[in-house]
Amino acid sequence: MDRVDQLVDELTLEEKLRLVRGAEDPDGTATGYVPDVERLDIPSFRLVDGPLGVRAEGKRSTAFPASLSLAATFDPDLAREQGAAMAREAKAHGQDALLAPGMNLLRVPNCGRNFEYLSEDPHHAARFAGELVAGIEGESVVATAKHYVANNQETGRTEVSAEVGERALRELYLPAFRAAVGAGAGSVMTAYNRVNGTHMSDHRRLLTDVLKGEWGFDGYVVSDWYGIESTVGAANAGLDLEMPGVPVAAPEGEEVDMGSIDGIPDGTKAGLFGEPLAEAIGSGEVPEERLDDMVRRVLGAMARTGALDGERDDGALDTPEHRALAERVAARGTVLLENDALLPLDEDATVAVIGPNVGEPKLGGGGSSETTPFRSVAPRDGIENRAEGSVTVERGIDAIEDLSLFDLLPFVDGGHGDGGEADDADEERPEPSLSDAVAAAEAADVAVVFVRDATTEGRDRESLRLPGEQDELVEAVADANDRTVVVVNSGGPVELPWREEVAAVLEAWYPGQADGSSIASVLYGDRDPSGRLPVSFGAEEEYPTADEERYPGIDDEARYDEGVFVGYRAFDATDTEPAYPFGHGKSYAEFRYGEVETDGSTVGVEVENASERAGREVVQAYVRPPAAPEGVERPVRELAGFESVEVDSGESQRVEVELDERAFARYDPEEGWTTDPGTYTVEVGRSSRDIRVTAEFER
Ligand code: NOJ
């Protein structure tokens, strides 16, 4: 008998119950805490946020770029490295499980948490989810795949029901989770929302039948915080661990009323796996074997990571390698949207750095993924450090305030104020002046304007336009200097109405602590901007979710009746030209594609760098299916593989891309996964709308 089985044998009922419900962390650093059982030498177990770095309470950690920025690298090896680095930092803070990665599909461009997620494409999301998980678990830390499933919006997130068909679930929303399980995730977190009427914490079919049954998941299912809705329902559905298990405490004399704030779970509801579970087991409503299974899963995860036997190294924090990685990922994820031969910048050029927040790094969005770094570089410092020519700095307009979920919560301090940067900077700042910004732009060889949005967990963006007067600022600067570059920091797609009036546009997402240095390295051409868009950029009304019934839904129901036509699949189906398509991103180098060959499982293509500079190309392989049977609609093309490669100037490289057959098969609710016989076309190119070469294969 192994140690876990033996422990399950020896534990008393009361001890078992304590292992499936969170408790207060005596150290106060963890986001979730499972108490120890001293009698049997079972150590305590700590769970900590989150996807952009470790958010141990009161501690500092490397602030990595947003997950969306990582995904924009189109280089899953970097995901493995970042996962491993975050796990080492979790260990250094004495934590056992990381509440990451987030992997919900980018269905709604407005979603306030898109920056924590990976892609609008399921194959792309699955590749990154898998590598992140492998990186975390490889360092003996439990990875938590979240939020299972269809948590695609923050508006009404604790109540809304995603009314989604089986085909879309299988083809779009489940693949990243399946990949996470395949890569060895020790934990899966349930989403707050309902799916087809049933709360995810109560969803027996998706938790027990699909996740644990079909996919063979042997880790534990943890609730999202205060996201458990019932005792018997959740226990019998397959939920294994309630978090945080203890209710929020109101300061003395204050009433607790949390049930009514949109996007905020009711923190007074906790302890459903405490006494109520004991009673349900006593009455037989929940079989005791189910409790044993929960305990076995929690202890199993502890055993696998070595936490159960205390066999684990101490990790590492803020090392030179972690800092360098945070910078490399931020630079590699930066997407060059436009470039009229202005970039890379000449080092001797005089530069006007303009923008309401140029003195602060854009670390991330608000909520449970906020990290407080040891060090960070603001955009203005990054450019001042790198430029050889003189640099002037102007804010132009009032600062864009970061939003934080924590500011919406009663009785909780925190939010972005923790780092203190924004607040300190405020006091020293002179009033911004638009005319000074315009004058600075006129006087300089080049104007670099930094603009940003503000997103947070718990709120969606009301509009895809940049907040405040930033569009006006860009227009005024572009009028004053036709060598204007705009660097956009956004947590998802944004509308950029001036995009054709400026010389260059970069999408740098939320770059984390290395903001200024990474963007300077791209602007000056020390690195090729090798990011590609993991999400289509269009006008808000062009997305399928522009319909109120689909988003945010009516009467707590969001109808996913666009089916599989999400993201570029929707733009293609309606023949709408997006501002920037999925997969788009320019390079400073220029690539030529040779003939393509395929046997249907791999695609080989020769890529030549026909420019004077070394560069990085992301070769993307889409598959166009043959005509589907009557009554079945198929996307025009689906991403089935990609490969990011560095090619030296004048060199050619043969690139092999493996095709994921599932990525272009369709899910038939009766037959399951189906590959229709016929002729398939592989389209190889630089984006979903820039196909360079094609080949065919039969199935
Ligand atoms: C709620 C968020 O949805 C989840 O992602 C996070 O891990 C928990 N809170 C804990 O902070």
Image: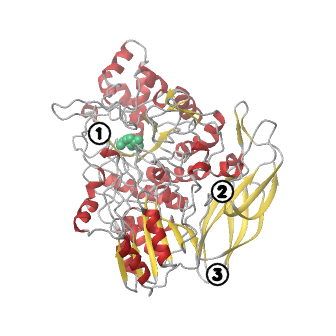
Up-down: is 498 above or below 10? below
Q: Residue furthest top?
A: 283
Where residue 657 appears, x then y in whole percent?
A: 68, 60
Query: Does any portion of residue 427 appear in the rendered image?
Result: yes
The residue drawn where x is 44% and y is 88% is: 348
- The numbered mark, 2 or 1, whose residue comes first in the sequence reads 1
In the image, 492 versus 512, the foreground residue is: 492
Label 3 element class: loop
Q: Which of label 2 and label 1 is nearer to you?
A: 2
Where residue 25 appears, x then y in whole percent?
A: 25, 40
* Callout count: 3
Disc 3 marks which amino acid?
A: Ser
Distance in Å between CA atoms under marks 2 and 1? 42 Å
Left or right of residue 89, residue 177 in this image = right
Disc 2 marks which amino acid?
A: Gly
Where residue 632 appears, x then y in whole percent?
A: 76, 38
Q: Residue under label 3, please give it.
A: 611
Where residue 275 appears, x then y in whole percent?
A: 30, 20
Question: Which image quarter has ligand 1?
Answer: top left
What mark, if any, has residue 641 been given in the picture?
A: 2
Up-down: is 638 above or below 147? below
In the image, 220 versus 581, the foreground residue is: 581
Q: Residue under label 1, please give it.
A: 44
